[in-house]
Amino acid sequence: MNRSPSVLRPTIGSFPTSWPTALLLGWLLLAGGCRRDSSPATSSTVEPIRIGEFSSLTGPLAGLGQYTHMGVVLAVEQINATGGIAGRPIELLAEDTGSKAGTAAPLVRKLISRDHVVAVIGEGASGRCLEGAYVAQGAGVPVVSPAATDPQVTAVGDCIFRVCFTDPFQGTVVAKFIRQNLGLRRVGLLVDTGSSYSVGLVDFFRKRLLADGGEVTGEQRYTSGDKDFRGQLTALKASHPEAIFAPCYFGEAGLILRQARELGIEVPLLGGDGWEAPELVEIAGSAAEGAMFPVHYSVRSTSESSHRFIDQFTARFQKPPTGVSALGYDALQLIADAIRRAGSTESPAIRDALKTTRGWTGVTGEISLDEERNARKPATIVRIEKGQLTFVCTVTP
């Protein structure tokens, strides 16, 4: 998708992830996704507030990007339906990275220099978020990432924020969970050396596991895009682990789960937040049963705002949200809150308001941004049972 000028009313939840970009853009046009009138009741003379988004709407990580995007769209629609911000509607300009490295920087540059957005949301994948973050930081435009967990993302500069927890936190969470909740000590590691996300999570996990008296029985490696993990899994099985930790994205995770069970590996398999997507169970089938991983938000949350979000999202897209849907929703709402508090749509003013975010409540819980512009919030461990995510426990920072 070269550009979707305004994606306020697409039924985006139903498009096939395998469509070529040109066909996808045509589908969005037919669906009404390129309307520029952000709200039917808004006068065309009112200047909209332009907010950009760059996300993986197609490609291997489309399951991540599409659900994030739907959350952003819902937030925009709700704000515009209530009069926008100080009477001005939000116009969302979305760009598709295609899940490809090297695409984010030029897309963010275009959003800023040509489309004149005042803030940007994106991306969920840490590698591409970093690419876009450097461009935005140089231009002084704030970026709020829904789900990029690599600590290096916000280290780019004072314009870069996130509403998710970071890899050091979730790596520690999983290690603590294995030692304290499962009572296990010996863990095998399977790492994607082509992914900074996977490498970073394994590093933080290993440090905490060893500090807690755990033991790494073996570490096997592969490269992003691999489909056959039987050799690595066979080697890990021979090291007699009590659990296997394999942080990666859902596509590879589904294959790893399936092939592990085919090899007779019966120990618990755990991953990172990148495992969360409906496609995980579609790929792994019954082999997904018992898999565990941390998420930023659970649809099992009992809060009133969570129930309201789930109902509204499901009514809008005819499917329940995932954790990244809620994160996308919170990212847009947080930017809107910063604009209101700043009383300005100038990027520096929005950035400064974001820096002072403390105790802000979104659908994923209470968020306070620390001095490194990272969200301080709890993580939830979930387990797959009968194809559904079930709540296990919550871990606070």
Image (cartoon, rainbow, N blue to C red):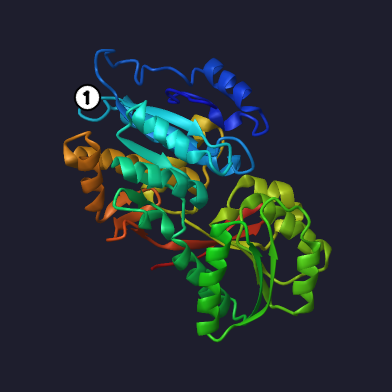
Label 1 residue SS: loop
Closest to the observer, 365 or 91: 91
Residue drawn where x is 42% and y is 36% of the image: 108
Answer whether residue 326 is visible to the viewer in this image: no
Quarter of the image where one finds residue 194: bottom right
Left or right side of 162 for 147: right
Q: Position of residue 350 (x, y in %)?
A: 24, 41
How crowded pointer 1 is (Cα within 10 Å; few <14, some 14-19, many 20+) is rated as some
Image-quadrant location for residue 116: top left
Foreground residue among 252 and 367:
252
Q: Position of residue 321 (x, y in %)?
A: 52, 42
Give me the residue at 26% from left, 25% from top: 83
Residue visible at 70% across and 53% down in the picture? 254
Q: Where residue 26 sits: x, y (%)?
A: 58, 18
Q: Against 343, is 209 above or below? A: below
Instruction: Say whether residue 342 is visible.
Output: yes
Q: Name the residue carrying label 1.
A: 87
Quadrant into which the C terminus falls: bottom left
Instruction: Indicate the amino acid at tag 1.
Output: Gly
